[in-house]
Each structure stands twice: as C-alpha cells, then as structure tokens.
Image (cartoon, grey):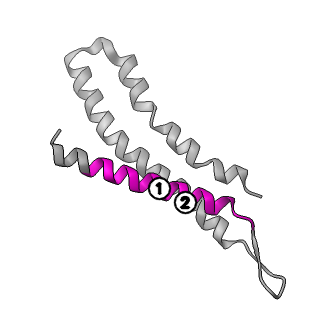
Amino acid sequence: MNKNTLKMSLRTLIVLATLALVAQGVAAEEDVTTDSGATDGMTGDVGVGLALGLAAIGAGFSQAAIGSAAVGMLAEDGSKFGVALIFTALPESIVILGALPLFLGN
C-alpha cells in the first residue's frame, strides 16, 4: 500500500468517526421546546440518520480493503476460508453500533 494512500485513508477514517460521534450526540439530544410550546424533534432524526449512514459508509470502505485482501489470501491458500470469512464479517459490527440510536430513541 502506498504511503500517501494510507495517510488519506486514516484521515478519512478520523473524519468519518468524528462525524459519527457528533451525529450520535445529536441523536441523543433532548427535544428542544420553543416559546410557543412546540417541540422540534427533527434534530434527533437527522442525528440518527447521520449515525447510521456514516457507519455504513465506514463499513463499506473497510469491506473493500478487507474483501480484496481475503480473496487474495484464498487464491494462495484455500484452507483459510474461515479466517477470511471472519475478517470480512467484522466490519458489519460497525453498522450494528451505528444503528443503536435507532433503538435508543423515543
């Protein structure tokens, strides 16, 4: 892997992780009551959508790299199918964690 590609990947990962954390904080925020007594529940919905969407994007980026490496490993040694399957399935837990605000909401 090229050194510049690695730097760019790490920067992208840091930015996406920061955005996901901010989005989960917005999703956990209480509804804001205006002077007229109406509540604005839109910010929580936007935060939930951002958290889930950014988690899915991050999992997609990692799946691309891990999937290609797993295929290369299987081409060299077919007996490592179990290891390749486990490493390919690991990034999906990121999406499950990103979906938590959906269930923790009202």
Depth order, front residue of 23/72: 23
Depth order, front residue of 85/29: 29
Residue 66 lies in quadrant:
top left
From the top left corner, tell me how far across and down residue 90 is, in percent: 46, 32
Residue extending farthest to the bottom is 36
**Residue depicted at 69% across the width and 63% down the height:** 29
Residue 3 lies in quadrant:
top left
**Labels 1 & 2 near each other (Cβ < 8 A):** yes
| Helix, strand or loop for disc 2 | helix
From the top left corner, tell me how far across and down residue 9 is, in percent: 29, 48
Horizontally, residue 102 falls left or right of residue 55, namely right
Quadrant containing the C terminus is: bottom right
**Residue depicted at 42% across the width and 52% down the height:** 57
Q: Is residue 71 above or below residue 106?
A: above
Q: Which residue is mark 2?
A: 22
**Residue depicted at 48% across the width and 59% down the height:** 19
Q: Is residue 70 above or below residue 57?
A: above
Residue span colored magenta = 8-30
How packed mark 2 is, by other alpha carbons closer than 10 Å (few <14, some 14-19, many 20 or more), is some
**Residue depicted at 59% across the width and 63% down the height:** 47
Residue extending farthest to the top is 79
Q: Which residue is mark 1?
A: 18
Depth order, front residue of 68/38: 38
